[in-house]
Image: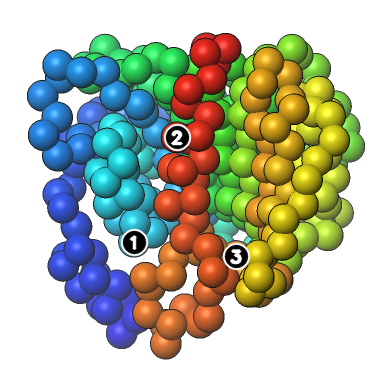
Amino acid sequence: MWRALILFALLSITRADWGTRVNLDRPEGQRSFWVFEPKGYNGATSLPLVVWLHGLTGSHTNAFLFSVVSTAYARGYILVAGEGTTSSSNLTKTSSPPWTTKLGWNAGVCCGVEVDDVEYIKEVVALTKSRWNVDKTRVFAAGFSNGAMLTERLACETGDKIFAAYASCAGAVMVTPGLEEGSKACDASFGNSSVSYLHLHGMADAVVPWLGNSTYKMPDITKNFKGWLSRLECQGDSSVTIPSEAYSVTRNTKCRDGHVAELVATKEGPHMWWEPNLPSFLFGKWPDVDVSKYVFTFFNTVASNKNAK
């Protein structure tokens, strides 16, 4: 309880505003998402858009906690924070861990949610474009954990039709039926799409393990990344080790149509959207990576790619 109270206080102090809530009617009922405009936005200039997806048991308010909102403000992006639905499948009731009982996303075999979240995101983006001045060549998707799994599913199933680049933190391709067959299903639906792809993962992640988890059909993260290198027809790679040895970067800039694929691996990173501004006495030691800043920098880097749709 005390931890929740401290977090509430932090959110109350650091938030810029609560954003604009937008409702939409879906077959599963009314759902919402939140839109955050950068300071001075007046609709006269088209701006890049990031759709951010929270993790399992989270909500759109996590975008404040992880400094996603403040980073979007600072970088001049329109930010959309989606919100999942309640897990309710037999998988949740019988074999899934106890944390899969609250808000989550249907990423395929994870995480006990049965609604069509790919269609939900399509509607979210379409509605946002209709009400805000969005640069349609600079629309990006990012997510954490179960939200990252949906981000990867979106990459598999929508390719470059909506988003120019994807960023997945502590997730993996969980397309049904999972593992190698799920990866093949992703290959088939992705086709010859041209996008850029970023993956960030902690090697100490105990929830979505670096080496995978066959019980929950979570792939090995190295294999997961190699799957994207193959889909994007990337050639070669370069590894850079930061002097602190806190994390390593495998970056490939020779992917289809000049796109980029990048894997950031941290040795001590837990299962979290790594946020160095969070108090260490609550959340422990963080790797020397600010995920929000890293993700937006990546999007800025690939935003000039004229081949992105």
User: Toward the viewer: 7 or 48?
Assistant: 48
User: Toward the viewer: 228 or 300?
Assistant: 300
Name the residue that disc number 1 marks. 65
The x, y position of residue 91, in whole percent, is 68, 49
Seen in the image, is 50 located left or right of residue 166? left
The residue carrying pointer 1 sits among few (fewer than 14), some (14 to 19) or many (20 or more) residues within 10 Å by Cα, namely: many
User: Toward the viewer: 300 or 101?
Assistant: 300
Cα distance, mark 3 to mark 2?
A: 25 Å
First in residue order: circle 1 vs circle 2: 1
Residue 186 visible? The answer is no
Q: Secondary structure at mark 2?
A: helix
Q: Secondary structure at mark 1?
A: helix
Name the residue that disc number 3 marks. 271
First in residue order: circle 3 vs circle 2: 3
Residue 300, which numbered label?
A: 2
The x, y position of residue 304, in whole percent, is 48, 22
Mark 1 residue type: Leu
